[in-house]
Image: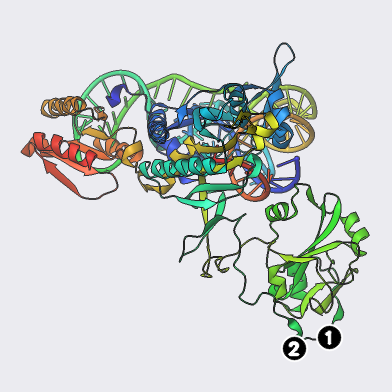
RNA sequence: CGGGGUGUAGCGCAGUCUGGCUAGCGCGCUUGGUUUGGGACCAAGAAGUCAGAGGUUCAAAUCCUCUCACCCCGACCA
């Protein structure tokens, strides 16, 4: 493509809307333009990159034995009512009626639709296993679209679904997809990390997220510097101290005492008032679990993890108690709750509480706290459990090394769904013995637009994008420094045609503008190999080769330039 | 949805507090010319419902009321 004829518009200045590097560069390099909040137009350069990503994904899915289909974005609401997820998704789903009054929605994902398909088509174990995938636009009415293409209301997703006769089969299908994901992200040049994750709205029990470390990421994940442990912050388990159940009898227990703490309803306030550090304090959080009151005890500097509560207690109906309920249950106002003297309420304590002595708790009275509170002596708990969010330097649950917390962009997520959907939607098959079983499912998603943003977050400099070879919009850019000069123009033309003849994707900057703009633009849009036809051509008949992201530049004769370019591309 | 902020030419912004003359600047764009190894130079030009509606006033980008859009922080996700 000749730049003079291409629909490429770059921006010199940063658009006011953009905050993060990838968003700024995608706008500046002319990859995308915003239509409205959460929806983006892909311009030719952006579309080329997207297509490259799609090609990689498609090749690897096919290689892993998955078969491509295409399901509608427009879906009947009734299937979603049948699975019970319409309520769960709630406002996240774009819904509307068609002219007949039938309820429709724009698919936020496709589990219901494939399961329904499989229900109708698969009747025998002989047809299993099978994995289907598609590349489709998803619609989610996000509460807050942001960071450009990273979180949008409309986005492209590769979603795959595996169907097996049993758990073992699912394990195999899951493993295949997991490996395919690794290959995809490697080919896209991403530094990624697979971590254990929450299953969330998808359901199921095992899942892994693929994270690209980036300060722009919206997720936190935990990694161990010494072993393989890696997890989303929400599922990360802090390793337990070697003596978690330390009986505090042997320790120097001080007498329990009530102290006045006027107006101090937060940990910080109490900490300052009593001059006691938060790790010496215990907060008592009152929740309603299936409408029953529960107290959760957490060390002052720790944070409760509501996801863990759900798993532990086997219900999703968990809400923080309001001030009235707290007063009714504890006898004291919000902000002064404590475990001592609580009745008719289950008390669960985080493991970290077990090794604490002489700590501060609320007194269940206005403006009062208890000091020197001790477990067992002063109150009992129903059980000890892992209730909290991991913090930096917590011990690794596998090897006790100090855990690290990083920020990342979630670019893919794989789930073992089991029979959640096949049961609720009635997708079953007959086994060898003629018995009916629900199919065992897995689902596997990749955010295709996010791969682009993540790649840029991973790889850019002051001057612009530095594309990984596999997803660059063009492999080579030719800069004709002064296209008015016949020798330069003719050589460029010949070079352009020679490279095209070798099936190399080349962008020829033939514009009759000052050289500086061309160099700046080439850097901005990040083409991996830059060939400059200019001064060196006029003086010595040489063409300069420079790789984006490297500083050195070498000069070659015409023929050498072609072979060297090919070498760089294939190597 | 709660909190914070912005809206003036395609893009980036000044002007708004303290109302007043033809609404300005940089980039980009058009035409002609000189240029061409890191966002050139000269000359001439085009381009604005000052987010929208209503109000106050002799007079509104500027003051008041409402509405809309967009961005940032929080809960949610690929």
Q: Residue at x 43, y 38 (%)?
A: A452
For residue A279, side relative to residue A370 (left or right): left
Question: Which disc number belongs to residue A252?
Answer: 2
Locate residue A365, reporting x and y percent. 91, 69
For residue A24, side relative to residue A348 (left or right): left
For this rendering, which residue is in front, A544 or A486? A544
Question: Which disc number belongs to residue A255?
Answer: 1
For residue A453, above or below residue A97:
below
Query: The C terminus of chain A appears in which quarter of the rendering?
Result: top left
Locate residue A277, reporting x and y percent. 70, 76
For residue A345, side relative to residue A138 (left or right): right
Cα distance between the residues tagged 1 and 2: 10 Å
For residue A489, side relative to residue A110 (left or right): left
Q: Residue at x 47, y 35 (%)?
A: A448
Locate residue B77, reporting x and y percent. 60, 41
CB within 8 Å, label 1 to label 2: no
Residue A14 visible in rendering: no
- Residues at marks 1 and 2 on the same chain: yes
Q: Residue at x 65, y 34 (%)?
A: A421
Locate residue A241, reporting x and y percent. 62, 74
Q: Identify the subunit bearing mark 2.
A: A
For this rendering, which residue is in front, A155 or A534? A155
Label 1 neighbour load within 10 Å: few <14, some 14-19, many 20+:
few
Q: Residue at x 63, y 43 (%)?
A: A204
Query: The N terminus of chain A appears in which quarter of the rendering?
Result: top left
């Amino acid at each position: 493509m000749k730049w003079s004829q291409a629909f490429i518009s770059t921006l010199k200045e940063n658009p006011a809307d953009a905050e993060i590097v990838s968003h700024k560069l995608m706008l500046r390099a002319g990859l995308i333009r915003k239509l409205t909040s959460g929806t983006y137009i892909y311009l030719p350069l952006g579309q080329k990159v997207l297509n490259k990503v799609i090609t990689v994904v498609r090749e690897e899915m096919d290689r892993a034995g998955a078969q491509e289909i295409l399901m509608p974005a427009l879906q009947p609401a009734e299937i979603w009512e049948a699975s019970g997820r319409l309520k769960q998704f709630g406002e996240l789903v774009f819904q509307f009626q068609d002219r007949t009054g039938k309820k429709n929605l724009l698919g936020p994902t496709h589990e219901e639709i494939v399961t329904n398909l499989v229900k109708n088509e698969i009747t025998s174990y002989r047809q299993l296993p099978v994995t289907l995938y598609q590349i489709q636009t998803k619609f989610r009415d996000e509460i807050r679209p942001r960071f450009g293409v990273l979180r949008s209301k409309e986005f492209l997703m590769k979603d795959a679904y595996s169907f097996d006769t049993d758990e073992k089969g699912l394990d195999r299908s899951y493993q295949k997809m997991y490996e395919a994901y690794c290959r995809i992200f490697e080919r896209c040049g991403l530094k990624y990390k697979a971590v254990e994750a929450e299953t969330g709205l998808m359901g199921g029990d095992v899942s892994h997220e693929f994270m690209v470390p980036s300060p722009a990421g919206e997720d936190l994940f935990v990694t161990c510097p010494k072993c393989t442990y890696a997890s989303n912050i929400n599922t990360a388990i802090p390793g337990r101290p070697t003596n978690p159940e330390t009986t505090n009898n042997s320790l120097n227990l001080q007498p329990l005492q009530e102290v006045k703490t006027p107006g101090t309803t937060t940990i910080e306030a109490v900490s300052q008032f009593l001059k006691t550090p938060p790790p010496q304090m215990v907060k008592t959080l009152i929740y309603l679990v299936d409408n029953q009151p529960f107290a959760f005890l957490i060390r002052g500097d720790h944070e409760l993890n509501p996801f863990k509560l759900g798993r532990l207690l086997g219900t999703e109906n968990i809400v923080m108690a309001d001030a009235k309920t707290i007063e009714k249950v504890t006898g004291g106002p919000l902000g002064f709750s404590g475990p001592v003297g609580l009745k008719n309420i289950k008390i669960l304590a985080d493991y970290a509480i077990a090794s604490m002595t002489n700590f501060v708790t609320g007194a269940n009275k206005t403006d009062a706290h208890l000091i020197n509170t001790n477990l067992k002596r002063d109150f009992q708990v129903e059980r000890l459990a892992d209730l909290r969010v991991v913090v930096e330097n917590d011990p690794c649950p596998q090897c006790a090394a100090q855990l690290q917390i990083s920020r990342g962009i979630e670019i893919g997520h794989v789930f073992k769904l089991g029979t959640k959907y096949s049961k609720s939607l009635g997708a079953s098959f007959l086994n060898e013995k003629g018995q009916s079983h629900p199919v065992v499912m897995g689902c596997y998603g990749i955010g295709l637009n996010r791969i682009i943003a993540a790649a840029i977050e991973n790889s850019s400099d002051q001057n612009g994008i530095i594309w990984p070879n596999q997803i660059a919009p063009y492999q080579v850019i030719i800069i004709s420094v002064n296209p008015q000069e016949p020798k330069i123009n003719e050589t460029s033309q010949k070079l352009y045609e020679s490279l095209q003849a070798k099936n190399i994707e080349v962008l020829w900057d033939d514009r009759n503008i000052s050289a500086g703009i061309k160099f700046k633009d080439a850097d901005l849009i990040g083409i991996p190999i830059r060939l400059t036809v200019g001064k060196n051509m006029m003086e010595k008949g040489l063409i300069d080769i420079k790789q984006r992201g490297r500083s050195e530049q070498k000069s070659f004769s015409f023929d050498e330039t072609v072979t060297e370019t090919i070498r760089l591309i294939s190597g």
